[in-house]
Image (cartoon, rainbow, N blue to C red):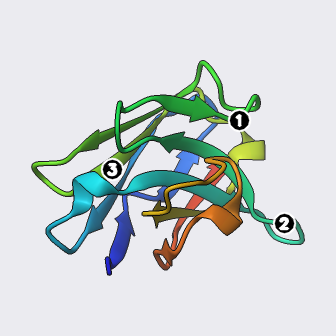
Amino acid sequence: QVQLVESGGGLVQVGDSLRLSCAASGRTFSGYTLGWFRQAPGKEREFVAGIRRNDGGAYYADSVKGRFTISRDNAKNTVYLQMNSLNPEDTALYYCAASSRAYYNIRYSSSYDYWGQGTQVTVSS
């Protein structure tokens, strides 16, 4: 089992950058595929980015591709989301999630077993 704690959210201006962090407990962090999701008020939770456990392959939603970068540091049990060129449409509660499943779709929230509490990102115009 793993516990996830996000940090790094805040209020920023259009065009600014933020780096979100998600620290995980447990000694098998490297065995988890990790994802970032977000949920804006009145909208469903959506996939933002994911990084596979085996080869570190990264996947992104079209809306953030080229602006966001997901990375992981297995030694620090931490996954990051570097967010650049932020715009008001990026405003949401951001969650990190972990999956140890053998078969999954990295873009589906149902693939993940563990979730953090979320960190708020607000982009002001």
Q: Could you tell me residue 27's position as x and y percent? A: 14, 68
Answer few, some or many: residues within 10 Å of disc 3's Cα (few below 14, many 20 plus, some between 14 and 19).
Answer: many
The spot of residue 103 in percent (x, y) is 58, 54
| Residue 28 image label | none
Q: Earlier in the sequence, mark 2 or mark 3?
A: 2
Asked whether 57 or 21 is in front, the reply is: 57
What label does residue 79 carry, if any? 3
- Report the residue marked by disc 1: 61
Q: Which sits in the foreground, 52 or 117?
A: 52
For residue 121, say whether it is visible. yes
Q: Quadrant of the C terminus?
A: top right
At mark 3, the secondary structure is strand
Mark 2, residue position: 44
27 relative position to 53: left or right: left
Residue 57 percent across, percent down from the top left: 45, 29
**Is 24 left or right of 56, judged from the image as shown?**
left
